[in-house]
Amino acid sequence: MEMEMQDAIGAGELGETVARLAAAAGLLEQAVVRLVERQSAFANDAEASIGRIVATVEARREAELEQKLAAAEAEIAELRAAACVPATVTHGRKTLPGAMANLLAKQGVAVDSLEAGSLDAALSSLSMEQRFAVKAQLLRAGLMG
């Protein structure tokens, strides 16, 4: 009987131990669930933060590229405008050769005020090649635009 009693006491203690272990296992499962939820929330927050950082960087880069594009377009417009305006002096020459000035003076053209109509009228007696040469000299001297 004593053995049976000891077995009964041992079985009761064993039952309590099993119950406590089952309760501990249940608490561990709950802790694991909470940790998984926290990890998921942390991962979502991290993804959102990374998304905001990437958007900020992209916006800055986009703004920088837009500024560079605007500067390049302005430079292109300036270069096109400069290409349309003839240079006043080319090759650094500011005067006509003496022979050219004499030829124009004989035809009655003043070197200070050249107009296309008066120049063509004055050069009408010359051959085509000579007219081109005179006009080329005037362009180089910067007297004709």
Image: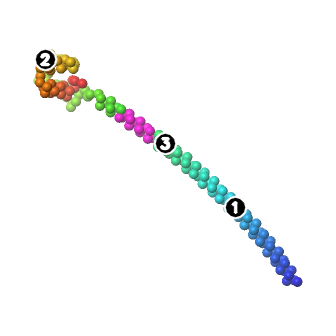
Compared with 121, 17 (above or below) is below
**Residue 75, quarter of the rendered image:** top left
Per the image, the residue denoted by label 1 is 31
C-alpha distance separating marks 1 and 2: 109 Å
**Residue 112 seen:** no
Above or below residue 73? Residue 112 is above
Residue 3 magenta-highlighted:
no
Q: Earlier in the sequence, mark 3 or mark 1?
A: 1
Range covered by the magenta-colored residues: 64-76
Query: Which secondary structure lies at badge 2?
Result: loop
Residue identifier under label 3: 60
> Which label is found at residue 71?
none
Q: Is residue 99 above or below residue 22?
A: above
- Residue drawn at point x = 66 percent, y = 59 percent: 35
Colour mapping: rainbow
* C-alpha span from label 2 to label 3: 67 Å
The residue depicted at 22 percent of the width and 24 percent of the height is: 144
Position in image of residue 105 (x %, y %): 13, 18
Mark 1: which amino acid?
A: Ala
Earlier residue among tags 2 and 3: 3
- Residue 116 in percent (x, y) is at 21, 20
Three-letter code, disc 3: Arg
Q: Nearer the viewer's eye, disc 2 or disc 3?
A: 2
Kind of element beneath mark 3: helix
Q: Which part of the image, by quadrant, shows the N terminus?
A: bottom right
Q: Which mark is residue 107?
A: 2
Residue 50 sits above or below residue 71 on the image: below
